[in-house]
Image (tube, grey):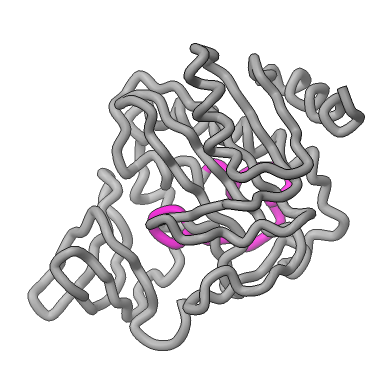
Amino acid sequence: MDLETRQLQQRLEQRQHLPEVLLVKPITQSTNDDVREIAKTGVQHVLVCSHQQSAGRGQRQRAWVSPVGNIYLSALLNLNTVIDGRLSLEIALNILHIPSLKDLDLQIKWPNDLYSLQGKWGGILIEPISPTQVIVGVGINIESVADQVQDQATTSLVDLGIKNPSRIDLIAEVYVAIQNAGQWFDHQSSNLAARFEQHAAFKNQQVAFEHIGGISTGRFLGIANDGAVIIDTEQGSQAFYQGRLRLAEGIA
């Protein structure tokens, strides 16, 4: 066992969240794919981290640029409740409250972007294995990287003001946050709308929402407790469950 793995194991043991399988890789194609293969063996608790991904992906199969030095991890999450759109919001909220990030003014861009006024600094990818078991992938920019997609500004924890962030501490804290989010979700994500509102990117701003029926524009009011986006359009208040939220003007 190398030093980094041993240190991470110690951090997770201290938090009483040591998984059955813990892997730290120098490079892999996708940590989500690694967890999927391990889950086939029947293991219930898995954490895979990598210093680099050669085939990282985000929402809608977009490539996730994964250079050396940032955080790329995936965990197996077992639930008692059938998965729905609230889960990614719950995970994002729990990540924003980890100790390493407590002094930053951070946001969530619906449904799964870890965001700030300066742009996106991380993201969440949820891939179900069954109705109550999911792979949760999290990518976090510790250092600045080239823009990951052309239509979205990006930033990093260092750019946001964290000096000398501990990669090991961040990984351990994020893993615990994922497990805590599962407990919130199993308890019906109590007061989700109110908790999200405190960190909502684009709140009360003019937005465009791209969905299967086209593009709806209006003022972003927040979310409902079931996780739906609420937009005040010319046709009145409308709820959307799937799609992409962006500012109506400029880069989002």
Relative to the observer, which residue lies in front, 132 or 146?
146
Q: Quadrant of residue 237?
A: bottom left
| 235 relative position to 44: left or right | left
- The residue shown at (41%, 39%) is 127
x, y percent for residue 32: 54, 38
x, y percent for residue 28: 67, 42
Relative to the observer, which residue lies in front, 43 or 156?
43
| 154 relative position to 149: left or right | right
- The residue shown at (79%, 45%) is 167
Q: Report if residue 199 is visible in the image.
A: no
Q: Point out the stretch of residues depicted in magenta.
A: 94-112
- The residue shown at (76%, 18%) is 13
Residue 178 magenta: no
x, y percent for residue 95: 58, 44
- For the N terminus, the quadrant is top right
x, y percent for residue 140: 65, 53
